Image: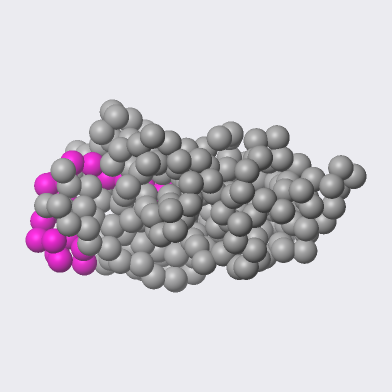
Amino acid sequence: MNYLALDASTEACSVALQANGKVYSRYELCPQSHSLHLLPMIDAVLCEAGIKLAELDGLIFGQGPGSFTGVRIGVGVAQGLAFSANLPVVGVSSLQAMAQQAYIKHDEKQVIAAIDARMAEVYNGYFVLDENEIMQAQQPEAVTPPEQLAAHLSSVVTEAFYAVGTGWDAYSEKLSEKSGENFAEQFLALRSNIDSPDILFPTAEAMLTIGKVKLAQGQGVSAEHAQPVYVRDTVSWKKLPGK
């Protein structure tokens, strides 16, 4: 089976292609220029593998959460390609993808992903490995102030976890603030990697691992039903003078 995965939900832009039993990938940190890089990267892996879009069996895209603009770019490109080749599509969480990377790279089976969501908040999720070796969310993904992360997850996180994502460094002081019940102190004591996370952004390769399982389970949809997942449904911007 041949699958293409793409992601533009964070500062990283990446694509991964599984074709004829091999994986071809591209990855680049390119903040605010995903629209310039994504399609050329897709062309590059297709050319390297020597296959055409019509030979794919499904398309996987990063559904967010992350940058509103980046998520929209990724979904739009996925829809356009899927329409042109009549491919089923499936979305994969950027948080879940980072958790999957932690398992692939470090054999970590319990992971908390936290992405800097700006506006003094973090997108976050708690993931545990399932019987199919896929990291699965243990509760709905959320966006919270970093100082509330411990309280938000303390009821489900009871064992050592591995931390991934930009949120841990961006809000290190706020994450360690103590609440009245010392949630933060108890919570952070469970963190196994106390240094800066080595996994900061999702990759299309990890999304490929998750997405092909979802497609095999019949979760693929037609292009028009591809949807982003923002988690936060409002955007903050400065009001123009006189408006």
Residue in front for this viewpoint, 129 or 13: 129
Residue in front for this viewpoint, 190 or 136: 190
Instruction: Name the spot of residue 30 as percent of width and height, x first.
Output: 44, 71
Residue in front for this viewpoint, 99 or 11: 99
- Does the rendering let one see residue 237? no
Quadrant of res 118: bottom right
- Does the rendering let one see residue 189? yes
Is residue 36 depicted above or below 120 in this figure?
Answer: below
Q: Residue at x 28, y 28 (%)?
A: 218
Is residue 172 depicted above or below 243 in this figure?
Answer: below
Give the residue at the far top of this rendering. Answer: 218
Quadrant of res 223: top left
Q: Is residue 12 left or right of residue 194?
A: left
Q: Is residue 174 left or right of residue 31?
A: right
44 in the magenta segment? yes
Give the residue at the far left of this rendering. Answer: 50
Residues shaded magenta: 43-63
Instruction: Name the spot of residue 85 as percent of width and height, x first.
Output: 18, 44
Q: Give the quarter of the figure containing the C terminus.
A: bottom right
Q: Give the quarter of the figure containing the N terminus.
A: top left
Instruction: Name the spot of residue 99 as percent of width and height, x first.
Output: 48, 50
Q: Residue at x 50, y 40 (%)?
A: 128
